[in-house]
Image (cartoon, helix red, strand yellow):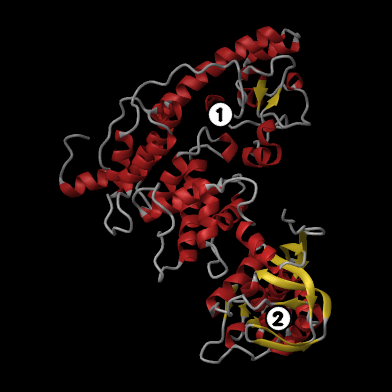
């Protein structure tokens, strides 16, 4: 019978950067012999500080809490003589990040390695290194920002070179570095082999890894600052909701082209900058989100289905500034897919694969279909037909059909009782599906009993402004019934109004039998105008 080493006392912690630097200074952070050398270049170090400044995640550190002897200790190019520590933090994962922070921020390690001479250029708000040995005139050494006292001293010393706004930027830099918290998992125990097993299993214990998790584990190591999680975090600033990491991975593979179901292990060549690909994916997804908002979809929780998002990201990566007519065709494909469930044929993944293949068929091929051809190919895979009658009972804000109803109601530009436009993105971000509130009791499962009526507002029946009522699909007959307490009559009347609104809303977007032609500018340029 074998005994298993226990992880008594193990758990998650969060370290401030000043605290982490101090732990290294006093010899409480050590690097095991099986860790690799310091391999980051200056760009990797700058990217780390940029992530901290922007509040992006930088990954979780993994420590082994164990005794450490006195004597010489080194972390990459940093060498120290330290005292013994009975409860030292041995670095299992995170060496590159820790060395970069300590080497760049601790004053005693100045000039030890040029990769650690990092500056924050106040003019461009970017992290830079020396240029031919010369510091930019308005660039703060990050080393001075670790402590408020040293930062203020630097600002006073260089006051003649600074502008008024520079002081706020420098203060923000110092606050970002001092306030940032790095997550860590600390393992206790006496068996080094156990640590190796934890290192191998930390991302896989308990359940199989998803496709996005595998991608993250394979390619988002310490030398690659980009990851699906970092893209999700960056997009969070758009207040559009939390996009799943699987959709990020699909977008990345779509942008690179070819079959999005291909094996991940050999995706990137040794000379490829993986972080750059994640950055391009983030930019493409941001364009896709802007396009969705232009279509009246203000939040991810209003999206009937997220399947089109990787397709849109791929399209906007290849065609970042399409012509208005192409955008109209692309919108037509989007809405037809949502209304007709993307054909429901063969499952989601084959549909997504065919859509990506129609606009970016080969991996890193260089040549792709032009914007019109790509949009036409997508439309060719969609269902061209009138919108079906959508039921207004069994309403559930998490279901695709109900979200189409919600989008139709959102198209009316709902207003508060004071006549102010409701910020739907803000409401949904704050309240989730609860943003579409019940306006009468006992009819929760019927769409006509729900509205984008902010919680805490005055009762709908007390509203007299016709413009406000119309923005919620309520006419005089409906509000009269509601004020008289005739709730069933109110709901039935409002259902009639919503049905008419929904029919016109969907038809205007799916454009049944709509003309498919190149943009007029292209037709005029080629002399082809007969089909217009």
- Decide: few, some or many residues near mark 1? Use Cα within 10 Å; few <14, some 14-19, many ≥20: many
| Circles 1, 2 touching at the beta carbon (< 8 Å) | no
Q: Is residue 34 above or below residue 419?
A: below
Q: Along the line of sight, which residue is nearer the eye, 453 or 189? A: 189
Label 1 vs label 2: CA separation?
A: 50 Å
Residue 404 rendering spot, x and y as whole percentages: 52, 27
Q: Name the image quarter holding residue 228.
A: bottom right
User: Which image quarter holds the C terminus?
Assistant: top left
Circle number at residue 105 = 2
Q: Is residue 316 at all visible to an observer of this figure?
A: no
Q: Is residue 363 above or below residue 168?
A: above
Q: In this view, does 94 lie above or below 436?
A: below
Residue 2 rendering spot, x and y as whole percentages: 72, 55
Q: Is residue 509 above or below residue 283?
A: above
Residue 174 rendering spot, x and y as whole percentages: 73, 73
What residue is disc 1 on?
A: 403
Q: Is residue 13 left or right of residue 329?
A: right
Which residue is at 43% across, 18% downward? 388
Q: How many marks?
A: 2
Badge 2 marks a residue whose secondary structure is helix
Q: Along the line of sight, which residue is nearer the eye, 203 or 520? A: 203
Residue 101 rendering spot, x and y as whole percentages: 67, 76
Q: In this view, does 298 lie to the left or right of 389?
A: right
């Amino acid at each position: 019978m074998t005994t298993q080493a226990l992880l008594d006392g193990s758990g998650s912690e969060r370290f401030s950067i000043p605290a982490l630097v101090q732990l290294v200074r006093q010899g409480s952070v050590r690097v095991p012999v099986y860790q690799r050398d310091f391999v980051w270049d200056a760009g990797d170090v700058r990217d780390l500080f940029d992530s901290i400044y922007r509040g992006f995640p930088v990954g979780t550190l993994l420590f082994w809490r164990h005794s450490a002897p006195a004597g010489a200790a080194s972390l990459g190019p940093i060498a120290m003589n330290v005292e013994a520590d009975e409860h030292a933090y041995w670095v299992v994962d995170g060496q590159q990040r820790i060395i970069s922070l300590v080497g760049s921020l601790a004053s005693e390690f100045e000039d030890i390695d040029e990769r650690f001479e990092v500056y924050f250029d106040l003019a461009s708000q970017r992290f830079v290194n020396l240029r031919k040995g010369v510091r930019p005139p308005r660039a703060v050494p990050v080393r001075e920002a670790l402590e408020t006292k040293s930062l203020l001293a630097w600002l006073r010393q260089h006051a003649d070179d600074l502008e008024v706004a520079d002081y706020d930027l420098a203060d923000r830099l110092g606050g970002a570095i001092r306030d940032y918290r790095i997550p860590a998992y600390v393992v206790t125990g006496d068996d080094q082999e156990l640590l190796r097993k934890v290192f191998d299993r930390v991302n896989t214990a308990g359940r199989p890894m998803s496709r996005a998790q595998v991608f993250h584990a394979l390619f988002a190591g310490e030398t690659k600052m980009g990851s699906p999680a970092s893209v999700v975090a960056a997009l969070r600033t758009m207040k559009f909701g939390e996009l799943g990491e699987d959709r990020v991975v699909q977008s990345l593979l779509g942008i690179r082209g070819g079959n999005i179901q291909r094996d991940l292990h050999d995706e990137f060549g040794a000379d490829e900058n993986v972080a750059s690909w994640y950055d391009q994916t983030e930019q493409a997804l941001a364009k896709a989100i802007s396009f969705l908002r232009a279509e009246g979809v203000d939040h991810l929780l209003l999206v009937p289905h997220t399947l089109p998002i990787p397709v849109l990201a791929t399209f906007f990566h290849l065609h970042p500034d399409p012509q208005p007519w192409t955008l109209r065709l692309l919108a037509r494909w989007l809405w037809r897919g949502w209304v007709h469930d993307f054909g429901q044929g063969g499952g989601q993944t084959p549909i997504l694969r065919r859509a990506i293949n129609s606009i970016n068929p080969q991996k890193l091929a260089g040549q792709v279909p032009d914007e019109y051809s790509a949009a036409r190919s997508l439309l060719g895979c969609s269902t061209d037909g009138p919108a079906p009658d959508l039921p207004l009972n069994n309403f559930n804000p998490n279901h695709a059909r109900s979200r189409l109803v919600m989008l139709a109601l959102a198209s009316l530009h709902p207003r508060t009782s004071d006549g102010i436009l409701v910020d739907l993105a803000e409401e949904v971000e704050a309240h989730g599906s609860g943003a579409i509130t019940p306006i009468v009791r006992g009819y929760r499962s019927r769409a006509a009993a729900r509205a984008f009526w902010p919680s805490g507002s005055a009762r709908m029946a007390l509203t007299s402004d016709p413009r406000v009522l119309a923005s919620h699909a309520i006419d005089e007959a409906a509000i009269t019934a509601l004020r008289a307490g005739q709730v069933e009559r109110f709901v039935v009347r409002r259902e009639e109004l919503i049905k008419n609104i929904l029919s016109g809303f969907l038809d205007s977007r799916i454009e049944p039998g709509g003309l498919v032609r190149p943009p007029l500018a292209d037709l005029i340029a080629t002399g082809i105008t007969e089909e217009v």
